[in-house]
Image (spheres, rainbow, N blue to C red):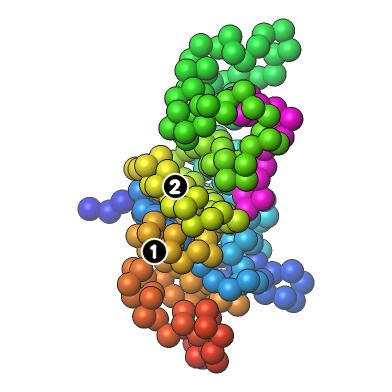
Amino acid sequence: MRYTPALQVQDMGYRIGNTEILRPMDLTIAPGERVALIGPNGAGKTTLFNLISGRQRPTRGGIFLNGQTIAGCTPSELHQRGLARSFQITHLFPNLTVLDNMRCALMRSFNIGLCFWRALSKHAALEEKAQLLLTQLQLTAHQNILVKHLSYADQRTLELGLALAADSTLLLLDEPTAGMSHSESRLVVKLIRHMTEGKTLLLVEHDMGVVFDLADRIVVLVDGRIVANDAPESIRRNPLVRAAYLGSAQPEVP
């Protein structure tokens, strides 16, 4: 029985002038699959994320979300279609409380626009969802604290929650454990596994412990092209991956 991929990239490439940033590539992710995107700095991981999330447009090929083309869609349009992204650098409102950040993230889901004469706390369904998410994120005790006073790990955790707030079916997580201690990373991995159950996940991550703990499949980018796409154990033994990460001479890529 055939299925519709959650995400499909077909012959997609990106260039600036005569410089190929991403060489033409194909990638298919099944619904509910967790895929990690790895590669050395400058491999093109962030560019690929930007193309999928609508921040840049491919110069060739197509991108499909649940079978529908999305190349050229804005981030806002993609958000409405069920795609959410977190960033390597936190994108939060530092002078709002944790709870207010969550309320703002939920406004679109509840079809609430800016309304200066009615507080968001008066929307019962939105408030209930905000409290539920903060409980799942283990941030309830900090809900009335300004975000700028949170620890870095808690800010990263909150941003994950904001990405999940819209009940998105496809999540792009950009280095969710960057800058965290080992113990903080373990907690975030546990949280991601729990809160993304049943959702499709594509993440960029440099911590290989996190990658092998979370991913069903690993895609390796080197010099703007996919050089490996396989199960974690196969990737661990792949000579191209070893070359890219250990700095030895890279084998020829056909």
Residue 114 appears in the figure: yes
Residue drawn at the location 52% of the way across and 61% of the way down: 205
Where residue 219 sits in the image (x, y, percent)? 45, 68
Query: Is residue 226 covered in magenta?
Result: no
Q: Magenta region's main secondary structure?
A: loop
Mark 2: amino acid: Leu
Q: Residues within 10 Å of mark 2 (few under 14, many from 20)?
A: some
Residue drawn at the location 47% of the way across and 17% of the way down: 128
Query: Relative to residue 34, is residue 175 drawn left or right?
Result: right
Q: Who comes first in sequence, dot 2 or dot 1?
A: 2
Marks 2, 1: nearer the viewer: 2
What segment carries the magenta color? 87-101
Q: Residues within 10 Å of mark 1 (few under 14, many from 20)?
A: some
Which residue matches tag 1?
212
Q: CA distance from mark 2 to mark 1?
A: 15 Å
Which residue matches tag 2?
187
Residue drawn at the location 43% of the way across and 32% of the way down: 136
Where residue 50 sits in the image (x, y, percent)? 63, 55
Which residue is more in the foreground, 189 or 125? 189
Query: Relative to residue 25, is residue 4 drawn left or right?
Result: left
Q: Secondary structure at mark 2?
A: helix
